[in-house]
Image (cartoon, helix red, strand yellow):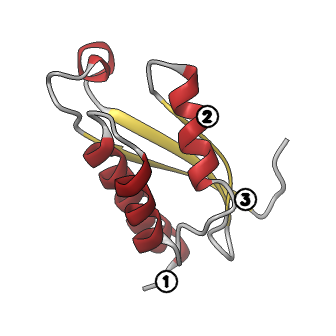
Amino acid sequence: MYEKNTILVVGQAKPSKDDAIYNLHGEFYISLVLDRESGRILDMDCNTILEVTKNFVASMLIGKSIRDDVKALELEIKERYFALTQKPLIACIKDAHNRYMMVTGQK
């Protein structure tokens, strides 16, 4: 399904204890299928409760670069995503960015 030049990177963060995700999963996860070289997000999934939330997050992330667009993604999330998982989603993006940079040996 995915090309050989792709990698899977997972970012995780602790959601608020008030969020249903905390009660169901304990952690908030985002899985990103990335182009190894550019860091471009090709596909994603996350453990949101509602499908519409996952689709909305995907619309913000797919096509962006986890390597180059972290600040822009954080700003877009702050401007468009108003849920208890706003901060954990940003933390997941930053965690995924750090993992991508470590795995690919970039700084």
User: Where, by quadrant of the figure, is residue 1 drawn?
Assistant: top right
Vertical side of 24 occupied by 68: above or below:
below
- Secondary structure under the numbered disc 2 in the rendered image: helix
Q: Amino acid at mark 3?
A: Thr
Which of discs 2 and 1 lies nearer the camera? The answer is 2
Circle 3 crowding by C-alpha within 10 Å: few under 14, some 14–19, many from 20? some
- What's the CA distance linking mark 2 and mark 3? 21 Å
Residue 66, image x, y percentages: 53, 67
Q: Residue furthest bottom?
A: 107
Q: Residue at x 69, y 61 (%)?
A: 63
Return the x and y of residue 9 as percentages of the image width and height. Answer: 53, 52
The residue lying toward the viewer, choosing from 63 and 83, is 83
Tell me: 53 left or right of 75: right
For disc 1, the marked residue is: 106
Residue 38 higher or lower than 61, as above or below: below
Rendering quarter of residue 78 = bottom left
Q: Residues within 10 Å of mark 2 (few under 14, many from 20)?
A: some
Q: Label 1's element?
A: loop
Mark 1 surroundings within 10 Å by alpha-carbon count, few (fewer than 14), some (14 through 19), many (20 or more): few
Quick one: quadrant of the C terminus?
Answer: bottom left
Residue that label 2 marks: 55
Q: Could you say which disc has been placed on residue 6 in the image?
A: 3
